[in-house]
Amino acid sequence: MQSERNHEVWITGTGIVSCLGEGPQAHSERLAQAQPAADTAAFAPYVVHPLAPLALEKQIPKKGDQRQMEPWQRIGTYAAGLALESAGLKGHGELLEHTDMIVAAGGGERDLAVDQTILTGLRSTKAPAHYLNERLMQDLRPTLFLAQLSNLLAGNISIVHGVTGSSRTFMGEESSGVDALRIAMSRVAAGQSAVALVGGSQNAERNDMLMLYALGSFLLKDRYRPVWERSAQPGVAPGSLGAFVVIEAREHAVARGATPIARLSALRSARADRRDAGAITRSLAEMWQQLEPRYDAKHLAVISGATGVEPATGEERAFLSQHPDIAVRATGSHLGHGLEPQFVMNVAIAALAVGRGILFPPCDGSGMEQAMEGPLTQVAVTSVGHWRGEGLALVEAVH
Amino acid sequence: MAALRDKAGRPIVVVTGMGVVTSNGAGQSENWQQLMAGRSGIRTITRFPTEGLKTRVAGTVDFVKAEPFSAPELAERMAQLAIDDAIGQAAIGSRSRFPGPLFLAVGPIELEWPQRQEIADVSGANGAVTYDDLLRAADGGGFRRYHERFLFGSIADHLADTFGTQGSPISLSTACASGATAIQLGVEAIRRGDTDAALCVATDGSVNPESLIRFSLLSALSSSNDPPGEVAKPFSKNRDGFVIAEGAGALVLERLETAKARGASILGVIEGCGEMADSFHRTRSSPDGKPIIGCVSNAIADAGLTPDDIDYINAHGTGTPENDKMEFVGVAAVFGERVKAVPISSNKSMIGHTLSAAGAVEAIFTLLTLEHQRIPPTINYRVPDPAIPLDVVPNASRDARIVHALSNSFGFGGQNVSLVLAREPA
């Protein structure tokens, strides 16, 4: 049973920051240039897409607030501010008091120096447990905990921007972003919510996060390549990014004079049993079929959240190859993979693309991405998590 | 015949199965006996050495086996036990196919010290250990199991596999309100008509040195330590912090109509959910109490009731000086003069603060309170705080007539969720 039946859901705001810059203009220009900003040196041998510099004070004016956050929270709070501004909600206390929020988050940065000191000390101490207790008591900054808690991005958004209608944080890598938007959309469509801020952020430029993915041998090494060209040496190139959208019931938007960027027409999430080869391909095909009656194939493109990890990307490729006439673009080639917020980032980019009626050019030498003629009115946004979870959204132009 | 929809015309959401694990034991009856006897599950920590720490007590769940030990491993095992009981009681679907989605409240997850040390050991670093050494060792392929174990989604993913829940399982955190949020998400999904049933679970197994120290550094924990069973003293004048604890709670929620149609026993009703975020401070509540007042009022209004209808409050009641005062300010504003006559008790006086699990564990205890028409006490209440003139059901359980009960959950990051629960559909 689905609940996208009562209220039409509009996307009325986007807030995006990545290695490509900040906002719609920068992203459109840089995506059009198809010149990815990947860094192969800073975290060698790993390839990382570093965040473009932000003028933090524009969205987080109090230095005290900035100091209370670690980078992932600053990126997210900044992007959330952009989205609220874009939707015309920023500073409107009464609207923000009934704005709902679902954030997709991982965990925050550790104090790497403290970890290194303790690990070094543990090698020589005769009383390791005592040493660990003593060092942690002395070395951990009390406020660092608050920068690490998953729900404290939402907490900071409440504090800095005044969003207080509701506050929920979903976790669980790529799926958390898909399901955050799915639940928020279902609530708006069913009349349980009128307007919602949804998104998240990632700081990829941190060794503790890279280590978690290195443990699973998931990281792209040595040389940057577009996601479709990684099958021989698969891997994800993490990207620092922040992405939020404001979604809203059409009636609510009209009543306050807000204009839509795009319509969020449908959204599905799934969890294929990946022990079976081909399960991801089948999972995508099943969701695709459910949305198919809505497609206008001549004006439809796919914006993919492909990670470059196998078998996820290979199976997505197999699915997309069943629809050779539909143009495909993977944003991961441009701005890296942002895990939790990647899907919302791609929905935002899709909304901006259908708003302009133009798809950005290919960035791929494998033949997967083909030029698209014709005006763009629909984008199907895919998500295939690096280890679990699939998602599909349909974003359409509002005429 | 009772109505199948509430006053707002929405499907009534009922509970048909419950499972609970705390430091006081596993299962409803074991836990209820302990609560009625006013027994504490708080013990001196033996899981790891506590020398040099200010706090040396916790409500650990040591009787659940979790190997190799880690917070997510223990959280997963406790959740399995709780879900097994809940699904068994509800007798819904089959043990391997639950006919609805999973909403799972979990604590933050990250690589822990034993694993970090294990990786450092194989890195072969001479002298100082750096993250470059760790990365090199991590990337060798020898620790693949740790990638999945320390992903945020892995507990939910494994539970979805074990119990065959439908669709993409949702892992969530609203800090110490997480358990209540899991229930709220289930209620909303059923009210929307997305599903007839939902499995709402909350679990937390994070008593380890770093978690303990993090809370300790924020001055959130009691440091009185001795005797352990008397450390947690919510609403007392000498309260000095909460006691960190572990546990899990699982509830099977169902649409009343389908529950009745299949002949299920109705254990209680989730009549209303309320929420309001606080934009005041990262760890402190707004001094005017507005978000707590709004949250409680929203829950009561969502249930189609007025404050006069509430017969009992299951408090968030952590035992920190700040929380208990602000909870009083909030409920006093909502209930007015009547606040002194409404019994309010804190389960945390006996089981400690089960963090992400608390909202679900305490919702289950509230439903048991409704079932037995008997209120669990706030134990260790020896020095009343004149600034909090409430009937906290001091030290001994007692009978009461309760039709509607409120359960509060508040958390860091301005999270506030309240639930209104009843025994029978109105």
Image (cartoon, rainbow, N blue to C red):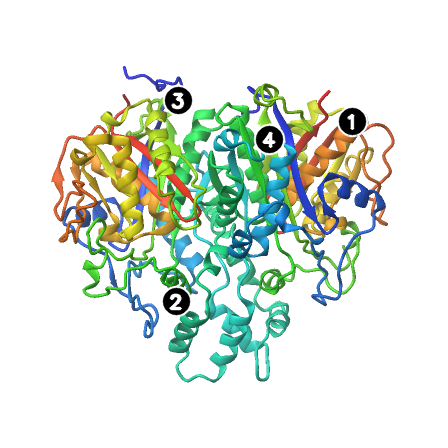
Disc 3 to disc 1, C-alpha distance: 39 Å
Q: Is residue B348 left or right of residue B249?
A: left
- Front tag of 3 and 4: 4
Which residue was labeled with disc 4? A247
- The answer to which of A90 and B399 lies nearer the viewer is A90
Disc 2 to disc 3, C-alpha distance: 45 Å
Residue type, mark 4 in image:
Ile
Which residue was labeled with disc 2? B209
Up-down relation of residue A182 to residue B73 (above or below): above
Residue type, mark 3 in image:
Pro
- Front tag of 2 and 3: 2
Image-quadrant location for residue B251:
top left
Q: Chain of mark 1?
A: A
Sort mark 2 into few (<14), some (14-19) or many (20+) by Cα contacts within 10 Å.
many
Residue B84 showing in the rendered view: no
Which residue was labeled with disc 3? B11
Disc 3 to disc 4, C-alpha distance: 26 Å
Q: Are marks 2 and 3 on the same chain?
A: yes
Residue sitting at x 62%, y 69% = B135
Please state the horizontal and vertical placement of residue A288, each as a whole percent of the image: 68, 32
